[in-house]
Image (cartoon, rainbow, N blue to C red):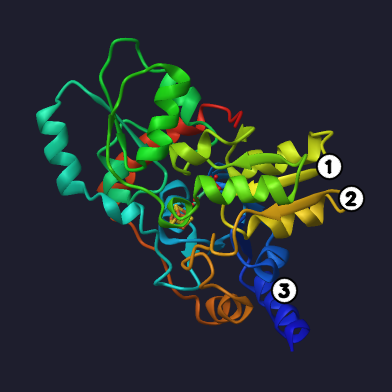
Amino acid sequence: MTQAIIKKIRHLKKQRNAVILAHNYQIGEVQDIADFTGDSLGLSIQASTTGAETIVFCGVQFMAETAKILSPQKTVLLPEKTAGCPMADMIDAGSLGELKKRRPDALVVCYVNTTAQVKALSDYCCTSSNALQIVESLPAGREIIFVPDRNLGEYIVERTGRQMILWPGYCLTHARITQADVADAKKKHSGAIVIAHPECRKEVRDCADELLSTGGMLRFAAQSSHRSFIVVTEIGIIHTLKKQNPQKQFFPIADSAICGNMKKINLEKVLWSLEDMQYEILVAEDVRKRARAALDRMLEVLPTG
Ligand code: 13P
Ligand code: SF4
């Protein structure tokens, strides 16, 4: 059954001149059928450079929207229209506009986990892999508003020493992970290196050996001389970590570290998406142009995380 679906997807992909992009948190089968898997920055770069006419985005709404902002002439499809990001929904353009009025001189840096409208009100966009470099590149002494992830924001403040006005948003999946989870995992897997995502809470970040984006985790695991890793992020990434490093061991921090929205897409939905050309992501042109400027400034900065 699965093989038949995969065959149909491959056939339709050619017919539609489509490319399938998948985030590292997608289910294994979806990551395996994708032309490219990666973190938010890697996927944005792929979306802006692909020659395909159609992009099937296996991720959540803000990611597909980012692809559309970067490639307006392409058809961008999200196979499950309700796949959203609760953190991105913790800020809207109206509330950011109010804050900007109160701080008219501040530069706004938005995490890529935001709507197109919020990006359109921002000066710079960033992902977890280039957030430090983006903030470091801003003029010293200039006030900075950072939205919406308070945890990523705190991490940037700790690392760069820059003071920022932080929005109180957070990722529900990473917020579930506790210091006790990390302590338990360390006891069970002594000698394993702890790699964590900066969306984790401070008590968890402080227990980590390395703080990395999901793309950074994949690069780190491949290059590291260590043999075993406790992976403190959404469990979907374990699939690719194991696939790319069969001789190493990867332990998920907790079975509950699951993003329900990232798990809404499966092979059937990818197939239906290509068959029906659904669900098309559209962004109003005036919003797109302003959001694009914030993304373009981000894409000029190379990732290190
Ligand atoms: P990255 O894959 O860019 O590290 O982002 C993690 C995430 O939570 C995406 O929603
Ligand atoms: Fe949003 Fe967190 Fe899910 Fe990423 S893992 S899509 S930040 S809720």
Q: Which residue is pictured at 66% across the width and 40% down the height? A: 194
Q: Residue at x 20, y 47 (%)?
A: 93
Query: Alpha carbon of mark 1 to alpha carbon of mark 2: how far?
Result: 8 Å
Q: Tell me whether the residue at label 1 lies in contact with that at label 2, contact meaning CB atoms closer than 8 angstroms.
A: yes
Mark 2–mark 3 distance (CA, rounded to whole Å): 30 Å
Return the x and y of residue 254 as percentages of the image width and height.
Answer: 59, 59
Q: Position of residue 243 (x, y in %)?
A: 80, 57
Q: Which residue is mark 3?
A: 10
Q: Which mark is residue 247?
A: 2
What amino acid is found at the position of numbered circle 3 in the picture? Answer: Arg
N-terminal of the two: label 2 or label 3?
A: 3
Q: Residues within 10 Å of mark 1 (few under 14, many from 20)?
A: some
Q: Quadrant of residue 239?
A: bottom right
- Mark number, residue 227: 1
Give the number of marks.
3
Are dots 2 and 3 in contact, CB under 8 Å? no
Precedes in sequence: disc 1 or disc 2: 1
Mark 3 or mark 1, whichever is nearer to me: 1
Residue for point 59% across, 32% down: 305
Tell me the residue at 62%/52% (across/down). Answer: 51
Q: Is the residue indicated by label 1 positioned so its CB lies within 8 Å of ligand 1?
A: no
Q: Would you identify the image quadrant in which residue 12 lies?
A: bottom right
- Residue 226 to residue 103: above or below: below
Circle 3 packing at 10 Å, graded few (<14), some (14-19), many (20+), is some
Taking depth in this image into account, of 253 and 31 the one nearest to the observer is 253
Q: Is residue 216 left or right of residue 225?
A: left
Nearer the observer, 208 or 165: 208
**Residue 158 locus on image (x, y percent):** 43, 23
